[in-house]
Amino acid sequence: MHLSPYAKHLAAALSLVVMAGCSSTGGTQDGSMAGSEGAGSTSGGASSQGMNSGQVGSNSMGMRDGQQDDIPQVRTIYFDYDRDTIRSEFEPVMASHAQYLRSHPNANVVLQGHTDERGTREYNLALGERRANAVQRFLMVQGVSPSQLEVVSYGEERPAVRGSSEDSYAQNRRVVFDY
Amino acid sequence: MKRYMSLWCGMLLLLLTSLAHADLTIEITQGSDRATPIAVVPFAEQGAQLPTDIASVIANDLERSGQFKPLSRDDLIATPSASSEVNYRDWRAVDADYLVVGKVGTDGSIQYELMDVYGQERMLGKVINLASPDQSRAAAHRISDEIFEAITGIRGAFSTQIAYVTSQGVGEDIQYGLQVADADGYNSQQILSSDEPILSPAWSPDGQKLAYVSFETGRPAIYIQNLASSQRVRASSFEGINGAPAWSPDGRKLAMSLSKDGQPEIYVMDVGAGSFQRLTRSDAIDTEPTWAPDGKSLVFTSDRSGGPQLYRYDLASGEAKRLTFTGNYNSRGRFSPDGETLFMIHRGSQGFQVAKQDLETGRLTTLTDSRADESPSVAPNGTMVIFATQQGGKGVLSAVSADGNASFRLPAAQGDVREPAWSPFLN
């Protein structure tokens, strides 16, 4: 299932409404809610830190001020199996990001490297980093300041699509520009 | 409307609760032909009733090891609860090599005896006092450990635990959880939840702490969490990859892979001092370190020769030597407790499979016939290897005996399960 960003926010809002509804019905359900939270929070600080990671989502929402229209629309490029070479078809995409970053020296982007699911996880973390590094080098050669760029590899941990077909693998081998 | 709302809430709560208690179930997928038949008679309950069917837990433990084939309850020819009531001939008639009987006393204590049917002798006879009935499952695992050791001479590993990672969802909406459960999948507890990835849990040798990688700040960092107190520290959060934590056998050091120098290199952190020492220097990927049981060397994955292969770094000489030469993909090594065998993920004809290499002969043997295996982790007694694989498009845990003859799966009711780490002995 593919959700548009708006549908995602709608879904998030709806689930908030449902949660709010839950607490207003009160009684025993509140009790069991507390119980299920308790199970998660036996780790104390660990759980609350985990909750904080939700802020990554709000970062992308924060881009609504001002320059959003200028950020190139295409923010994902794809790679061949076991390769970190930037395919020629994505060079225009790369060039558009380079141009945007050069003309917006205050803009920062996280280059997220991803792999498909094949192979071991930590090794894939390293392969994902190699892809994101290749994109970073390309942008730097095009005159983007290193201070605007950060590389984070997710390896196979955040697949865009599920499945073990060649098609799903191809959609998961990617670098995402996360402004 | 209100009624539908509460139905909704009920479902939501059900979901949350089941997420928090994501117990795994066991499915034996392959039994060994050489498994020893054993009869485990249901324990007689003299007044006190326990929440656990002790005999059933013992039989399941022994069967899971691949070394025993417990008789079905329908085939039990009699129901003695003490050796004095045993007629050995009966049990020879149903081909049981060994017999376990027992009873729960009025005070809730558990008595059990193990008998050698052909030798017609009692091998074990013990009484276990429980502080409370909810210890009955742990007591059953302890009995399994003692029976296993009495017959095989190998220490049982049924009272151990496994850590693993769960995930639900796809794309931006994945929820990750780090869980710890008993080795049979029961009593799971979530010790961390996050909407950012969690991976590579590693038990400290004393079984009290887990090191793991969490992306909860948006970047990977290594954390060390005390399981009893839930207190934790961020051990390593350099720029780039902070990955693949591995405890030294003495628990004082943590090997890891850091990419702060440009590409992933193997580092060793002194956990007490907080200092880091770089071991490898190559312009390739060096990751997935693991310590030899004697603490004198580490094995790690490197693609310095092109594809991923396993190398051994000798701490005294500082030299790294390639170990694997079969095939073009060998990664994520893990030692057997005696240090003589290396388990790994090997890309074979079918895909990514658990394999083992005899370190003396260099001979590599594939242990599974699956195609997407990951993350092998060896039981502390060396008899089984737990790993992650796929079943019906879902991530599940699976285990195979070190000789490859027996296997079982631990599927979860929902979501994906992966990154298993078998605890050390905990008692």
Image (tube, coloured by chain):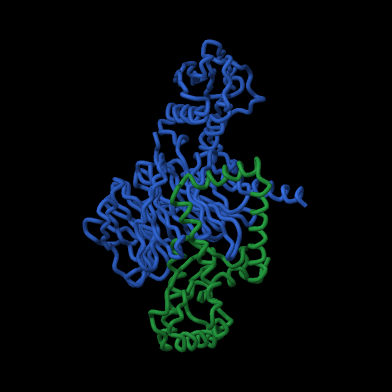
Task: Using the image, determine if residue B219 lies above or below residue B315.
Answer: below
Say left or right for B410 vs B290.
right
Say above or below: B389 vs B66: below
Q: Is residue A143 left or right of residue B372?
A: left
Q: Residue furthest top?
A: B84
Please determine whether, in this image, residue B400 is positioned above or below residue A67: above
**Measuring 43% from the left and 65% from the top, which residue is drawn there?**
B219
Q: Residue B378's x, y, as percent? A: 43, 46
Chain A is shown in which shade?
green
Where, by quadrant of the figure, is residue B264 drawn?
A: bottom left
* Residue at 63%, 50% in the rendered image: B414
Residue shown at the point (50%, 20%) measured from the top left: B110
Residue B142 location (% of width, % of height):
46, 29
Q: Going by the image, does B284 lie left or right of B30?
A: left
Considering the image in quadrants, where does the N terminus of chain A appear? bottom right
- Is residue A25 found left or right of B321 in the rendered image? right
Residue B138, given in percent of the width and then of the height, sits at: 49, 31
Q: Which chain is blue?
A: B
Residue B309 can be seen, yes or no: yes
Return the residue nearer the eye: A168 or B66. A168
Q: Is residue B409 visible in the rendered structure shown here?
A: no
